[in-house]
Every structure is written in structure tokens, then in C-alpha cells.
Image: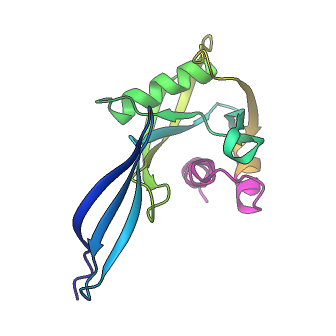
Amino acid sequence: MDYTEKKLRRVCAHRGPVVELTEDIVELPNGAVSVREVVHHPGGVCVAAVDEAGCVTLVRQYRYPFGQRLLELPAGKLEPGEEPFDAVKRELSEETGLEADNWTDLGFLYVSPGISTEKIYIYLATGLHQGKAHPDPNEFLDVEKMPLRELADKALAGQIRDAKTVVGALKAAAIVLGN
């Protein structure tokens, strides 16, 4: 059976500098009509940057919606027309000052497919070189390092709650550590 929902009408409820919220009226497979609220987001990138000692570089920053500082992989939003690989190199440099010789594409994930169009592209970076960080003017973060095995263990134990960091850490660990 085809479970596709047919969009009948779209109304823009909010348009901001990062997201747009629409209310879509859809026809369901059984003919009933329903409403779908959708957050349209340009997407983002994140990177597990692993050094020769097996440590991953992380950032700790305040996340307003949750009122707390979270430990995360370096990440950021795609700019209009920007390719994910260009964005991930930019974000790693901005937030940590790192550049990498080797990059592995770890795929992408849908952040919250029930309500958002946001996709995050995940990369593994190795062969790291330290430069000077240059975060955006309104970006306040601390850079930390942790052994990749410890980060993966924390992700599995539920001590890391940022989804992109959990996925990125576990994918990087599977490649770098072989499990």
C-alpha cells in the first residue's frame, strides 16, 4: 500500500533567520485530512576530529532551549548554497582551529523526521593540524579533548545527549577503534 500523504495547502506560520515553520494540510492515505507542522531548516554538519593519540576534539557550549551547557562534536549550520564538505571544514576551523589531512564521510541523519527537514552530515577527520580558532562573534564555547573510546562509552551510557554527537561518536569509534 502507498502511505504517501498528499499536500493540499501550505501556510507559512513563521519565517526567521534560521528556520521557517509551515502548517501543511495533507490528505492521508485513507482520504482523511490532517495537519502537519514542519520546521524547514537548511541542514548542518558535524565532525569527529580524532588525533594521533585517539582523542576526539569536542566543544562545550550553552544551549538555550535546554538551559545547560552540552558537550558536542564541532558542528554548524549550512549556509545557503554551501556544500556539506566545505561547511564541515569551515566549522572545524572556526570552532577549534583544526585542519585535517584526511576526511571520511560518515553519512547523514534526519534530526527529527516527524517535524523537521533538518539533515546533519557527519564526518570523521584525521591527520589533524592545530591552528587558531576563530568562532563566530556570538558563539561562546570551550574546546575539550577526550579519548574516543571514552566518548563512545559515554554516548552508550546516555551521558552524551546531543544526537549528532552520539551518532558521530559511535560511527567514528566503529571505524577508528574497529567496534
Residue closest to the eye, 133 or 10: 10
The reply to whether residue 98 is in sight is no
Q: In the figure, 80 relative to 46: above or below?
A: above
Residue 173 image position (x, y, % from top left): 61, 51
**Residue in view at x 75 percent, y 60 percent:** 158
Q: In the figure, 129 relative to 21: above or below?
A: above
Residue 27 image position (x, y, % from top left): 25, 76
Magenta stretch encompasses residue 63: no
Q: In the figure, 128 relative to 9: above or below?
A: above
Residue closest to the eye, 110 or 89: 110
Quarter of the picture containing the C terminus is bottom right
Taking the image as shown, residue 24 lies to the left or right of residue 17, namely left
**What range of the chain is rendered magenta?**
152-179
Magenta stretch encompasses residue 173: yes
Taking the image as shown, residue 2 lies to the left or right of residue 142, namely left
Residue closest to the eye, 96 or 124: 96
Q: Residue furthest top?
A: 132
Magenta region, main secondary structure: helix
**Residue in view at x 60 percent, y 12 percent:** 131
Residue closest to the eye, 28 or 145: 28
**Residue in view at x 56 percent, y 19 percent:** 94
Can you tell which quarter of the image residue 140 is in? top right
Can you tell which quarter of the image residue 167 is in? bottom right
Residue 54 image position (x, y, % from top left): 68, 38
Quarter of the picture containing the N terminus is bottom left
Colour pattern of the rendering: rainbow
Residue 175 image position (x, y, % from top left): 54, 51
Taking the image as shown, residue 104 lies to the left or right of residue 64, namely left
Taking the image as shown, residue 136 lies to the left or right of residue 12, namely right
